[in-house]
Image (tube, rainbow, N blue to C red):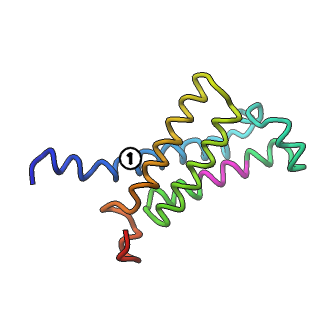
């Protein structure tokens, strides 16, 4: 196997871990510093849900931590990647066009790529299934 082949074989794992670390960073920041994130919660979401902004930030941070950890471990890889991708696409829509929206769109597409690829060579899922 050539170096190029080995590098290509590592790409899905590197992408999965990188995406997971981004979600873990954002989720942990929301849980540790919720006040910094309150301005990102649209009033319409609070009105529809009946929840306060701090509660929504805590839910969002917890969601990103739980599924970020699953993605990092490669546990329920496709489900985790799909949920995180849909989550980020919604955030992208809410944020709108601009630097933040474009960044979030890129993260969404990276999560979609992980979903499409599925289980890579270092996923914990490999221990529980023979299906890719």
* Predominant secondary structure, magenta span: helix
Point out residue 98 in the picture as x, y percentages from the top left corner. 61, 22
In the rendered structure, which segment of residues is drawn in magenta? 58-64
Horizontal relation, residue 101 to residue 18: left or right: right
Quarter of the picture holding the N terminus: bottom left
Please state the horizontal and vertical placement of residue 54, each as a whole percent of the image.
80, 43
Depth check: give the residue in front, 55 or 4.
4
Q: Residue at x 60, y 29 (%)?
A: 101
Image x and y of residue 122, in percent: 33, 62
Name the residue: 67% across, 35% down: 93
Name which quarter of the figure residue 102 lies in.
top right
Which residue corresponds to mark 1? Answer: 15
Q: Residue at x 58, y 41 (%)?
A: 26
Farthest front residue in view: 116
Q: Furthest residue to the top?
A: 98
Residue 7 relative to residue 115: left or right? left
- Element at label 1: helix
Q: Nearer the viewer, residue 20 or 48?
A: 48
Number of numbered discs overlaid on the protein picture:
1
């Amino acid at each position: 196997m050539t170096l190029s082949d080995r590098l290509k074989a590592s790409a899905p794992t590197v992408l999965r871990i990188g995406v997971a670390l981004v979600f873990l960073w954002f989720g942990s920041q929301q849980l540790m510093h919720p006040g910094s994130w309150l301005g990102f919660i649209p009033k319409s979401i609070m009105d529809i849900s009946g929840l306060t902004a701090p509660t929504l930030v805590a839910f969002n941070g917890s969601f990103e931590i739980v599924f970020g950890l699953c993605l990092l471990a490669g546990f329920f890889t496709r489900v985790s990647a799909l949920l995180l991708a849909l989550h980020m696409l919604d955030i992208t829509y809410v944020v709108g066009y601009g630097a933040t929206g474009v960044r979030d769109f890129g993260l969404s597409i990276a999560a979609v790529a992980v979903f499409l690829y599925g289980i890579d060579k270092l996923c914990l899922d490999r221990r529980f299934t023979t299906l890719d």
